[in-house]
Image (spheres, helix red, strand yellow):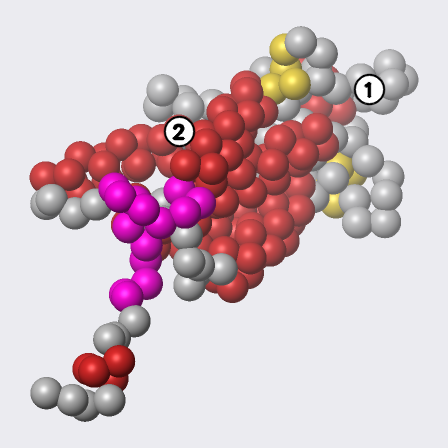
Amino acid sequence: MFSRAGLVFWGGLLGGTLAAWIVIRRKGIPFLRIADVAGPALAAGYAVGRTGCWAVRDDYGRPWSGPFAVAFPEGILPSTAGTLAGHFGASIPPDLGANTVLAVRPTQLYETALGLVMFWVLWRLRDHRHAEGWLFGLYCVLAGVERFIVEFHRAKDDRFLGPFTTAQLIAFGAITAGAILLIRRHSVGPGRPGILAPSASPSFASGAT
């Protein structure tokens, strides 16, 4: 749990959500109301957090020779042929020495850019007219789709069933949970309050007493 593999975003999100749920329940505040507020902030925080992955030269992608390829000779795990083959199971030409530095996909920047896009979408929809929790459901769907796609390009050592990773399995769960929230919180109704205050009555709005 406390190894390099355990200190990851999904674990932090799940643990943080559980801790927040406990505190919010104790204070008697509707959890989904706070979750809606948290959705855009989580997306923005994710974008900023991935710049940290870029700064420490970690969580990079598979070997690549494209126009935006980047090498990390001094990363937490340097992007050498030995690291990519030994730690991530990448297919490396046998004639390359273990210490040969290879260029890889800058997946940290992919995720920073996509995190900002998620934030922009959620921020634009923050005044939605659905029930509380709808916006958080949308965040879960967007975050799951983003991670599911990027995982295909990352250097990972936990792939199963071919190209899929543990993070993609969790991402699929996030998409499913988010879709359920989107459906169940689509309309305001009994037990499903909206986020916007009801309009003032005509007599109140006109100043009548």
Q: Is residue 61 above or below residue 209?
A: above
Give the residue displayed 31% in from the left and 36% down from the top: 17
User: Could you tell me residue 114's position as x and y percent?
Assistant: 62, 50
Q: Is residue 195 magenta?
A: yes
Q: Is residue 201 left or right of residue 186?
A: left
The residue singled out by tag 2 in the image is 11
Give the residue displayed 74% in from the left and 45% down from the top: 70
Give the residue displayed 63% in from the left and 11% down from the top: 160
- Quadrant, the C terminus: bottom left
Q: Is residue 133 above or below residue 178?
A: below
The foreground one among 131 and 137 is 131
User: Could you tell me residue 35's position as x and y percent?
Assistant: 33, 46
**Residue 92, numbered circle:** 1
Q: Is residue 30 visible?
A: yes
Q: Residue furthest bottom?
A: 207
Stretch of the chain drawn in magenta: 185-198
Residue type beneath disc 2: Gly
